[in-house]
Amino acid sequence: MWMEDVRKSKVSPLVFLLLAGVLFFLGYSYLQPSNASVQLTFLDVGQGDATLAVTPKGQDILIDGGPNDSVVNKLDESIPFYNHKLDAVVLTHPHADHVAGLVAVANKYQINKVYMSGVTHTAPEYLAFLEILKGKNVDVQLVKAGDSLDFGDGIKLDFLFPLTKMENQTVDNLNNSSVVTKLSWGDSSAIFMGDLESEGQDELLASNQNVKANIIKISHHGSKDSVNASFLVAVGPKYAVIPVGKDNKFGHPAREMLELLKGLIVYRTDYDGDVKFELTNTAVMVK
């Protein structure tokens, strides 16, 4: 009956179609089941890092962007077509295999806030990313150990490294300036190492922070200095994820590192593609 009334009115067909589209969208959104878990995906972007976490409230958190714009296609697969917003983007360090893809991400997505160390680097991909953030007036927070993001319902992202502010500092080894984060919800947790090498892991251990986690994202694509045995014991993970490119020229992951991971359930993006987990406040499940 209401459609007949609309046809008799002087409402244009375009307005009618727009109204129908809005009603369809609202109905579709309302009927979607609520997600009672954090969806955690280690994206297969080749020889680089990019990890997406989506909270039960639909908050999207991206850690690094990989070596190229393939990350955008991956995000499009994981984020609804009508959502072009990222609540938080973390850049662990400004090497191209972590930051280059964020240029395309920043061009396409509305980013609420970016978190990084602020270390100095002149790589063109990093400078391009900073220029886009400036042009779009994206809020940037420089982080250190002790900082934390609260996503509600007990879901937190804690910053564990670097131990002190590194704004405008020039460092010899960018890997050991990596922003290390830990996502936790009750009994479930995942630690993201950036490219922090063995020496940096010793520093993190000495800070006496809680690094225990169910999942560890292995540093530096599984290079031989990517896992410190003492640090691995302190984390005590069940799962290890190695983001690494197929047949990469560096020979990653290294045999020595894989030996250290024996006894864990290990996933590699070169073999397994996207690696997906569901985290509730009581359990971690592989999808």
Image (cartoon, grey):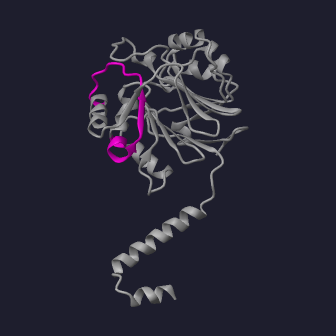
Q: Is residue 157 left or right of residue 92?
A: right
- At 43% from the left and 17% from the top, the residue drawn is 177
Q: Does residue 117 show up magenta in the picture?
A: yes
**Which residue is rendered at x = 41% and y = 40% of the image?**
112
> As rendered, which of 189 and 140 lies closer to the eye?
140
Q: Position of residue 167 (x, y in %)?
A: 36, 18
Can residue 249 be seen by looking at this rendering? no
Q: Residue at x 38, y 46 (%)?
A: 109
- The picture quadrant where one finds residue 118 is top left
Quadrant position of residue 173: top left
Which residue of the protein is positioned furthest toward the right in this rendering? Answer: 282
Q: How many marks?
A: 0
Res. 180 visible in picture: yes
Relative height, residue 14 to residue 197 (above, below): below
- Specify whether 265 is left or right of 42: right
Highlighted magenta segment, given as a residue range: 104-125
Q: Is residue 96 left or right of residue 52?
A: left
Judge left or right: residue 87 versus residue 187: left
135 and 11: which is toward the camera: 11
Instruction: Give the percent coordinates (x, y) of residue 39.
Output: 59, 44
Q: State the image coordinates of residue 224 (x, y, percent, origin top left).
A: 52, 17
Task: Return the x and y of residue 171 as percentages of the image width and height.
Answer: 36, 12
Identify the residue shown where x is 32% and y is 19%: 120
